[in-house]
Image (cartoon, rainbow, N blue to C red):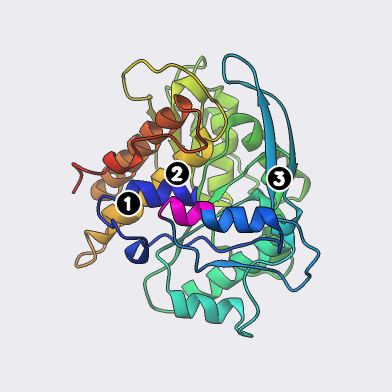
Amino acid sequence: MAETATRVLSFHHPSPTSSPVKLISPHGNDDFGLLLRTGMQQAGMRTDGLFTPADDGERTAVCSLMLDDSGDLISGVADMDIGQAALYSTCSHINLAALLEEEAPEMIVFDGNIGAQQAGELLTACETYNSTERKRILTLFEPTSVTKSTIILSHFAESTKSNASRQPITFATPNAVELEQIHATCVDLDLLLHSTKTPQDSVSNIPSNIVEPSTLVKAKALVDAKIFSTVLLKVGRHGVVTIDATSVQHHPIPAGQVEVVNTTGCGDSFAGAFTATLSHLLSQNNASPVEKHGTQWYEIINTAVEIGQLAARNTLASTRAVGEGMHLLLKNRA
């Protein structure tokens, strides 16, 4: 996600030192860690957010995938345990709240690899930061997998027990299966509102061959319960469906043929490019903040979704983890 975001913004921020994208991630004191740092430098990415955890025995995260001739995943092996070892560097003895004060990020993007404890710590720090009168941090959660898609829910369960008001995650990018799992776990944890509305009240006119109406109802329930503000539901070849408090909208994939080479990494490319575009377009309106759910907000979301889908197409047609041509996607945008 970070590499995609960096490349998408590289037309406007050509130097790595000027890039607004900072990846904060642990790596092991091993050969893969050195390879990661070197590879990021060669890709024009910032490395000032990389760190090694206090435990010297932690291994750098690695993933090995086997694809068939169509580019679809057959099997894979991943070791991502280090993501749960540390969320940020503690060498400077700075805590997460102080780190957010120092960095003042516009957006924070995280995925399921950081684990439930780290996700709770991150969301709590964001909520504390956003409780003051200043520009709020937007958040995006990429679920990663069905198993890891629910790591955020322990945090909301704890806030429910303590009667704390919920601050929803701004965006989530699940597919239909991940969304079903998130909804089912919310039901088990009693995190959803007990509404008297019938399911039809929330269903749009989007055809069932694109997404099942029941899936849209569940997405809307997660929004109503303030788990997410906006769900960016990935529906494969049909594109993306956005669901928020006031609307449900289908975003077909932009026209054009693409030769499928690799179906892995497309979700990360979408999330990274969406975030980069959203941040870039919002920064153009610093003098006049964009009102959520207003006309300009939806125009920006529509553009960000379109760029995200184009980025996913680039990766779909590439043998690389991040497709070529990302730097051109924002070239003609404001």
From the viewer's perspective, tell me whether residue 239 is left or right of residue 11. Answer: right
Indicate the quadrant where residue 76 lies.
top right
Mark-to-mark CA distance, 2 and 3: 23 Å
**SS category of the residue bearing label 3:** helix
Q: Do tag 1 and tag 2 residues touch (Cβ < 8 Å)?
A: no
List the residue tagged with mark 1: 9
Residues packed near mark 1 inside 10 Å, few (<14), some (14 to 19) or many (20 plus): many
* Residue in the image at 73% along x and 58% along y: 82
Residue 153 tag number: none
Mark 1 is on which residue type? Leu
Mark-to-mark CA distance, 1 and 2: 26 Å
Which badge, 1 or 3, is on the more N-terminal residue? 1
* Residue in the image at 60% along x and 14% along y: 69
Which badge, 2 or 3, is on the more N-terminal residue? 3
Is residue 41 located in the magenta-colored stretch of the structure? yes
325 or 275, nearer to the observer: 325
Mark-to-mark CA distance, 1 and 3: 29 Å
List the residue tagged with mark 2: 244
Can residue 292 be seen? no
Q: Specify start and end residues of the magenta stretch as a single range.
A: 39-44
Mark 2 is on which residue type? Asp
List the residue tagged with mark 3: 148
Indicate the quadrant where residue 226 lies.
bottom right
Residues packed near mark 3 inside 10 Å, few (<14), some (14 to 19) or many (20 plus): some
Mark 3 is on which residue type? Lys
